[in-house]
Image: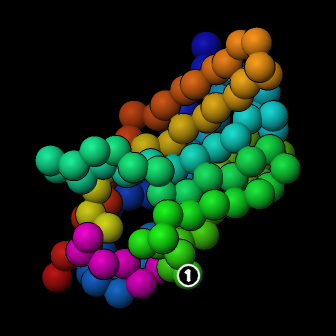
């Protein structure tokens, strides 16, 4: 049974930092592309950052230069380092794991962790 468990969310002041972690189990972690999504109240879920199995990263424009995604395959963990946080970063952050080989695909989600940026 695949599980993705996020941690590290919380309340932080504007300009502060948080590091989110997502630990995966029940899957061959290293072959999956991993992503962090977020969903703010009344808004659609959006992809914030992703990292491929070959360590290629991508970011939504609004977080470029502030957020860094990384992965440790030995620990089955993906991280999202968030610096210079802004109130508009407030959202529930979800970890996602995806894999496809052209014939079949797999897609898994964590339960989410709340990030609130407020003074």
Q: Which residue is rendered at x = 22% and y = 49% of the image?
A: 43
Quick check: is 45 in the magenta stretch? no
Q: Main secondary structure of the magenta part?
A: loop
Left or right of residue 94, residue 13 in this image: left
In the rendered image, residue 79, in percent from the top left (x then y), is placed at 61, 57
17 to 55, vertically: above or below: below
Quick check: is 87 in the magenta stretch? yes
Between 19 and 109, the one lying in front of the other is 109
15 to 25, vertically: above or below: below
Q: Which residue is rendered at x = 51% and y = 42% of the image?
A: 95
Left or right of residue 9, residue 21 in this image: right
Q: Secondary structure at mark 1?
A: loop
Residue 87: quarter of image? bottom left
In the rendered image, residue 18, in percent from the top left (x then y), is placed at 45, 70
Between 82 and 48, the one lying in front of the other is 48
In the rendered image, residue 118, in percent from the top left (x then y), is placed at 19, 76
Q: Which residue is rendered at x = 54% and y = 38% of the image?
A: 96
Give the magenta-colored segment's residue range.
83-88
Query: How would you rate the neighbour count of disc 1 (Cα within 10 Å): few for under 14, some for 14-19, many for 20 or more?
Result: few
75 to 59, vertically: above or below: above
The N terminus appears in which quarter of the rendering?
top right
15 to 93, vertically: above or below: below
Q: Which residue is mark 1?
A: 65
Between 100 and 89, the one lying in front of the other is 100
Q: Is residue 91 visible?
A: yes
Left or right of residue 4, residue 30 in this image: right
In the rendered image, residue 40, in percent from the top left (x then y), is placed at 24, 53
Q: Number of marks in the image? A: 1
Q: Is residue 75 visible?
A: no
Q: Which residue is rendered at x = 47% and y = 34% of the image?
A: 110
The C terminus appears in which quarter of the rendering?
bottom left
């Amino acid at each position: 049974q695949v599980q993705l468990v996020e941690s590290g969310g919380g309340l932080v002041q504007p300009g502060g930092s948080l590091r989110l972690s997502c630990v995966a189990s029940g899957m061959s972690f290293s072959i999956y592309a991993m992503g962090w999504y977020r969903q703010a109240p009344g808004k659609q879920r959006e992809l914030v950052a992703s990292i491929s199995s070959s360590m290629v990263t991508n970011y939504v424009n609004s977080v470029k230069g502030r957020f860094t995604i990384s992965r440790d395959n030995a620990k089955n963990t993906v991280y999202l380092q968030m610096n210079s946080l802004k109130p508009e970063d407030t959202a529930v952050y979800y970890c996602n794991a995806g894999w496809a080989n052209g014939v079949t695909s797999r897609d898994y989600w964590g339960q989410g962790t709340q990030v609130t940026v407020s003074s």
